[in-house]
Structure formats: structure tokens, C-alpha cells
């Protein structure tokens, strides 16, 4: 039995969660179209299905907190405040892109929103997140650093090195594993000797919990609690968000390794219609309002595509910029 | 000026920069309580305390990654990798992260860090602890690389490295730590990057070296002087940026070049420098560019054969004689 939404958060906040999830979904589905048209090239990893994690977690943090992520990073950057126009322009490889078209889908970065990067080497962001937390501790900045990563990344050496280090130095890092059950085509139990992932932090004396990553409210509440704990104790914490990606690993992956029945079960847990249903059932929104939100998101994504496609390509000279200060 | 060792010059640079700038922090394996595997960080913990001088776990990749994040987050970290050999465990953070984040994030961040790495061969430490990996770093854009030969440069280059807003790989030669020289006392004494030093002037052959190879090249040149052979010795000081101008200007004068590298010859930096020399002053050369390099073998332990694998002053001198004896 689900808890009532009423009382958890004001109605406007609940509607904002809904709108952010819809925006992310529309953005990702539009990316798939633009990829099919050849406007977006290279690697493209979509977030469809996992929206409750980015939206719920981000809402549970303070804006000064740092966020680092892997390559499946569009939603996390946008929810944090990055302009969808400039994110889309980045994917189109244009000069107006959030990283001047030099990063691409996997390397979004928006320091004014404390979104400190998408990293495409699996597990590469762990030590960097620990470094950010170290800096904010030495500088007495009272920030939590949130490090997102996948289930597969937990098998990298950097995971172990960084959890050990974060606890040893008592750094305020909130590790959030987005367990979507697959690292490309390899299911968790075929890659991790302990398939209950959140148990793996006990060797580093880091407390952990498992949260329903298809439930934006649960993600929000857990993150808010965990971030407060990390801030208060100045120690790392670990959340395993159990979720699912509706698409293949990347656009190159038809996801043949998953059964359609498995897919159907998770589809029925889609965080967006589920929140819609609860909003309507509790009288927080009517169908008309939800449709209005949907249309607004569609329009915003269309505008992002227009902005990107009308943007100029980078100058050739840009090749040589930003290698050295 | 004060006479001091290369080790103490590095130690002094660290102390001066930590006193000057509270955002400079130091950590590494055994750098704090134990004061460094080579005792380079002596006295730092007691002067600056355990927030700024810290021991860390044996996790090289994470040592570099933490420095990257800390630098992006506003500190000026100096991380020590106990020896350069262990940098191979950190190549992911060095090459894929440290050297890339500024570029791939469109110039929106900077990474002002220094990774200190003692290295080089000649102490009978065997194949895994005697390597010269400078070419590995040089191959990758996005980082500066300094390799001091003298105590004065050790101080001045390290201070420049710490103030640099780019990531710097700072290579130190283990056999130079006890070498002595005059070092300026001025706390603003900085040696700029990308400016080679002429260790000795001459007009018949240009010897190009760096780190301990620059010192051995100078020894060879002094030996050759007695035989009436005049060599000019160029110490590159930094491998990135590379001061090709000074090298070329010297060759314009001498017409002959010997590049001395401690690393393996195959795909080593000497080949790159030689090809640049050919590209810049082919018509001025009186002889092909000669390379004197570490032998392409894993380093053997036994001192009798180890020394055959690393360029020595006598070998460099003989290389110069051979070059001059050959008719082209
Ligand atoms: C060091 C490294 N090894 C391999 C890859 C190729 N790769 C990219 S994503 C991926 C799977 C990662 O899975 P997971 O951490 O669960 O994240 P998810 O894609 O499910 O979000 C792999 C193996 C890589 N990018 N980096
Ligand atoms: Mg996964």
C-alpha cells in the first residue's frame, strides 16, 4: 500500500516532480529521433525509465551540493538546472552546446548548477567525487558531494578505493548506485559475487540502504534523509536505487538479452504514469492539468531541437582551445 | 644562494608554497608521519598539520583522481606517487581524467594540481622499480611535465608547477636526491616552463638531455673538453612544453645533435625530438641526429649489467666521438 502523497510535499512540488520527469522522458525520446535522423551521433545512452532517481535525488539535495555522474547524464544535468537548449546543442555538436560541442552526450558539465560532470570511463567519477568532497571539507563549504554510478561500476577498483578513502577521511559523499540490473548486457548476478549490491559497503563501514528507484517520492525522501545524515556526521553514505532502463544500453543496443516479460513488469512500474495516477487519485491534479504539463514539456523539447539545429558549428580554431589554461 | 641537495630544494619549495597559499595541500602514501619514502616531505606534517599534510591508502588511481576533484573544487593539491612505476596504476585518472576534463567540459574548469613522481633507474631495484616513463606522459596532451636536473631547478620548477593552473607531472630522479648545488633563497624564485637551460656552452655538438641525463651529458661534455671537443649541453627542464627553439638555436651553431634519453628507445621521446630537429634544420645538419637511450629491455637487477642498460657519461662521450669520427 502506497503512502498518501498529501502531506509529504506541497502540491506544487509534486507537480514539479511530475513535470521534470516528463521533460526528461520527452527529451530522451526526442534524442532517439534525432539520433535516427543522424543529427546526434556517437554514443547516446538514454535515461528513460530511471527518471525518478534523478528527479527525486536532486530534490532531496541543496543547490550548493555537488553532483557527479556517469555518461547517462542528460536528465541529471537538466534536472539540476542546465538549459535543455544547450544540452541538446551539445548533443548536436554545436558551438552553443553546454561544453561548446566538445564534450558530447557523455560529458555534460554545468558548474553554475554544481553539476560537476558526466564521466565516460566506468568508475572514473568515484575518486573525483571524493576529491570534490575533500576540497569542500578543507574549504569549510558545508557541501555534500553526490556521486551517481551504475551497478556495473561497482566492480571497478576505483569503487573500492574511493569508498575506503571516503570513510577513512570522513568525507561528505553520498554514493548513489542506479541499479538498473545491467552493465550493457551483463546482468548484476553475473558480474557481482554479492548480488545484493548495497550490502557491499560493509567492508568500508559505510551504512547503506535500498530504495525503490521507480518511486520519485521514495527517492526524494531517502535522499533528503541521507544528505542530512551525511551533512550532519560528515561521513559517507550509500543508497542503492533499484530501477530499470526501458531502452537498450545505448542506441547501438537492441537489448536482446532481456525477456519481454521482464520488460513488461518494469514497464508497469514506469515512474511517470504511476505518479500521474497517484496525483489524480488524490485530487492533486486532473487529467487536463497533466496533459497541459505534457504539452509544455513537448514544446520545450521541440524548442531545444530547433535551437540546436539552428546553432552554428564550432569554429575550427576551437580545436586548440581549452587544452591548457 | 644556499648550497643544498635536490631533495632539500624540493622540500623547501613545498614549504614556501604552503606558507604562501593555504589552498596547497599534500598527500600521498607515507608522506606525512613517515615523511616520504625518499624523505622529501620531512617536516611538513609538523609545520602544516594533518589537514594539509596527509597519509593516504595505497590506491594510486584514486590518489590522482582525488587530486583532480580537489583541484576542480578549489584546492591546489600536490599528490606524491611513491614512484613513477606506480603511475601505471593511475594512468586512467592521469590520461582519461586529469588531462581531459578541462577540454571535454569546454574550458569550464581547471585542474591546478601537481603529481610528484620519483623515478629513473640505477639503484639495482629490478625491472618493476627502475623505469623511466616520461615518454608515456609526453604522448598525451593536456598536462605539463617538468623534470629538474639541478637543485636550483628542482626548487624553481616545482614552485612554478604549484602555481600553474594546469595539471603538472613532476618527475624527480631518485639518484639526484643527494646531489648538491646552489639554490636561490628568494621565495619568488621561479623557473618558467618551456625554457630550456644551457648547462654548458660549446660549438661542435649539441647534447640534448633532461633530468639525470642532462647531468650525465654535462659530465661527458667536460670529459670531451679535455680532448678538445666542444659540446653544448641543453637541459630541456620541461618536456611539455618543450623548448625546441633553444635546441634548434644550438644546432644552428653546432650542426650536430645527440639526444640523450633515459627511457627505452622504442617510441621514446628522443625519436620525437630527432624528427622535429630534422623538420626544422635538416639543411644545417652535418650528421644524422644520434640517439643515446636506455636499452629496450626490462631492467636487470645485477649492477654489473644494469649499468649497461642506462646511458652513462662515458657512453655519451663515446657516442659523441663516434658521431664526429663518421664521415657523412
Ligand atoms: C573502464 C571502462 N570499461 C568499459 C567501458 C564500456 N562500458 C560503457 S558503459 C558499460 C556498462 C556500465 O554499466 P553500469 O555501471 O551498470 O551503468 P549503466 O549503463 O547501466 O547506467 C561498459 C562496460 C567503459 N566505458 N569504461
Ligand atoms: Mg547498470
Image: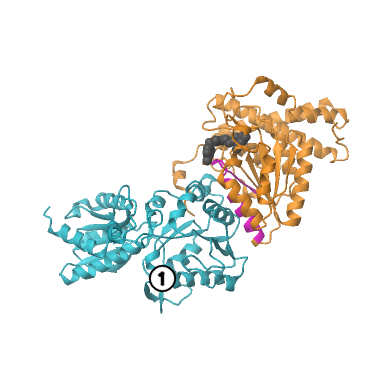
Chain colours: A orange, B cyan
Residue B279 visible somewhere in the drawing: yes
Q: In the rendered view of the protein, which quadrant contains the N terminus of chain A?
A: top right
Confirm whether the magenta stretch covers residue A119: yes
Left or right, A108 with reference to A222: left
Is B67 displayed left or right of B261 in the figure?
right
Q: Nearer the viewer, residue B300 or A267?
A: B300
The x, y position of residue B295, in whole percent, is 29, 53
Q: Chain of mark 1?
A: B
The percent coordinates of residue B206 (x first, y second) are 24, 61
In the displayed orientation, state which residue is furthest to the front: B302
- Figure check: B252 above or below B268: below
Residue found at x 16% / y 61%: B321
Dot 1 lies on which element? helix
Q: Is residue B222 above or below residue A160?
A: below
Q: Can residue B294 be found in the magenta stretch?
A: no
Q: Residue furthest bottom?
A: B2
Ligand 1 - quadrant of the structure image = top right
Among the 4 quarters of the image, the one containing residue A78 = top right
Residue corresponding to mark 1: B6
Residue that appears at 72% across and 42% down = A57
Q: Position of residue A10 (x, y in %)?
A: 85, 40
Residue A16 showing in the rendered view: no
Q: Which residue is pictured at 52% across the width and 58% down the height? A: B113
Q: Residue furthest left?
A: B327
Residue A132 location (% of width, % of height): 62, 54
Say how many tags the image has. Answer: 1
Residue range of the region highlighted in magenta in the rendering: A114-137
The image quarter containing residue B204 is bottom left
Q: Is residue A232 above or below residue B37?
A: above
Q: Nearer the viewer, residue B75 or A20?
A: B75
> Neighbour class for label 1 at 10 Å: few (<14), some, many (≥20)?
many
Q: Which residue is outermost to the top? A: A260
Amino acid at each position: 500500500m502506497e503512502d498518501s502523497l498529501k502531506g509529504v510535499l506541497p502540491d506544487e512540488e509534486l507537480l514539479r516532480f511530475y513535470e521534470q520527469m516528463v521533460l526528461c522522458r520527452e527529451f530522451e525520446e526526442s534524442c532517439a529521433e534525432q539520433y535516427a535522423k543522424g543529427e546526434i551521433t556517437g554514443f547516446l545512452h538514454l535515461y528513460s525509465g530511471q527518471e525518478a532517481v534523478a528527479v527525486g535525488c536532486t530534490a532531496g539535495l541543496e543547490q550548493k551540493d555537488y553532483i557527479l555522474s556517469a555518461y547517462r547524464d542528460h536528465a541529471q544535468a537538466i534536472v539540476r538546472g542546465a538549459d535543455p537548449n544547450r544540452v541538446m546543442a551539445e548533443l548536436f555538436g554545436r558551438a552553443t552546446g553546454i561544453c561548446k560541442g566538445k564534450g558530447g552526450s557523455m560529458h555534460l558539465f554545468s558548474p553554475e548548477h554544481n553539476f560537476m560532470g558526466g564521466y565516460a570511463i566506468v568508475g572514473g567519477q568515484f575518486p573525483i567525487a571524493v576529491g570534490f568532497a575533500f576540497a569542500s571539507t578543507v574549504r569549510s563549504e558545508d557541501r555534500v558531494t553526490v556521486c551517481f554510478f551504475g551497478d556495473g561500476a561497482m566492480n571497478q577498483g576505483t569503487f573500492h578505493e574511493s569508498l575506503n578513502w571516503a570513510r577513512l577521511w570522513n568525507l561528505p559523499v553520498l554514493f548513489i548506485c542506479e541499479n538498473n540490473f545491467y552493465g550493457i548486457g551483463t546482468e548484476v548476478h553475473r558480474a557481482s559475487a554479492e548480488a545484493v549490491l548495497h550490502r557491499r559497503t560493509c567492508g568500508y563501514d559505510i551504512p547503506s540502504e535500498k530504495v525503490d528507484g521507480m518511486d520519485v517520492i521514495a527517492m526524494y525522501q531517502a535522499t533528503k534523509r541521507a544528505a542530512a545524515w551525511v551533512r550532519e556526521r560528515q561521513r559517507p553514505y550509500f543508497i542503492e536505487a533499484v530501477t530499470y532502463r526501458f531502452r537498450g544500453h545505448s542506441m547501438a543496443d537492441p537489448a536482446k538479452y532481456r525477456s519481454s516479460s521482464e520488460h513488461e513488469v518494469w514497464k508497469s512500474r514506469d515512474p511517470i504514469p504511476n505518479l500521474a495516477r497517484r496525483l489524480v487519485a488524490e485530487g492533486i491534479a486532473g487529467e487536463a492539468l497533466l496533459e497541459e504539463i505534457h504539452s509544455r514539456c513537448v514544446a520545450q523539447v521541440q524548442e531545444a531541437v530547433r535551437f540546436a539545429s539552428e546553432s552554428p558549428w564550432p569554429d575550427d580554431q576551437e580545436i586548440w582551445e581549452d587544452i591548457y589554461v | 644562494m644556499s648550497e643544498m641537495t635536490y631533495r632539500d630544494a624540493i622540500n623547501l619549495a613545498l614549504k614556501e608554497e604552503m606558507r604562501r597559499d593555504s589552498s596547497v595541500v599534500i598527500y600521498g602514501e607515507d608522506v606525512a608521519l613517515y615523511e616520504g619514502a625518499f624523505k622529501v616531505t620531512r617536516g611538513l606534517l609538523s609545520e602544516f598539520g594533518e589537514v594539509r599534510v596527509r597519509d593516504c591508502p595505497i590506491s594510486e588511481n584514486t590518489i590522482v583522481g582525488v587530486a583532480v576533484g580537489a583541484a576542480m573544487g578549489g584546492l591546489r593539491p600536490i599528490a606524491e606517487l611513491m614512484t613513477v612505476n606506480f603511475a601505471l596504476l593511475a594512468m586512467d585518472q592521469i590520461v582519461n581524467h586529469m588531462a581531459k576534463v578541462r577540454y571535454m567540459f569546454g574550458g569550464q574548469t581547471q585542474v591546478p594540481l601537481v603529481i610528484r613522481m620519483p623515478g629513473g633507474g640505477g639503484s639495482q631495484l629490478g625491472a618493476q622499480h627502475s623505469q623511466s616513463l616520461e615518454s608515456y606522459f609526453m604522448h598525451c596532451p593536456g598536462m605539463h611535465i617538468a623534470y629538474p636536473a639541478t637543485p636550483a631547478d628542482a626548487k624553481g620548477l616545482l614552485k612554478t608547477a604549484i602555481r600553474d593552473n594546469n595539471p603538472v607531472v613532476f618527475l624527480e630522479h631518485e639518484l639526484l636526491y643527494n646531489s648538491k648545488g646552489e639554490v636561490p633563497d628568494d621565495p619568488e624564485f621561479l623557473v618558467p616552463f618551456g625554457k630550456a637551460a644551457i648547462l654548458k656552452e660549446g660549438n661542435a655538438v649539441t647534447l640534448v638531455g633532461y633530468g639525470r641525463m642532462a647531468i650525465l651529458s654535462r659530465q661527458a661534455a667536460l670529459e670531451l673538453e679535455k680532448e678538445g671537443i666542444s659540446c653544448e649541453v641543453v637541459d630541456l627542464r620541461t618536456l611539455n612544453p618543450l623548448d625546441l627553439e633553444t635546441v634548434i638555436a644550438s644546432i644552428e651553431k653546432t650542426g650536430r645533435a645527440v639526444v640523450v634519453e633515459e627511457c627505452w628507445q622504442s617510441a621514446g621521446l628522443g625519436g620525437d625530438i630527432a624528427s622535429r630537429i630534422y623538420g626544422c634544420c635538416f639543411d644545417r645538419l652535418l650528421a644524422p641526429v644520434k640517439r643515446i637511450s636506455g636499452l629496450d629491455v626490462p631492467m636487470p637487477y645485477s649492477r654489473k649489467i644494469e649499468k649497461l642498460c642506462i646511458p652513462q657519461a662515458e657512453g655519451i662521450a663515446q657516442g659523441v666521438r663516434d658521431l664526429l669520427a663518421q664521415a657523412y
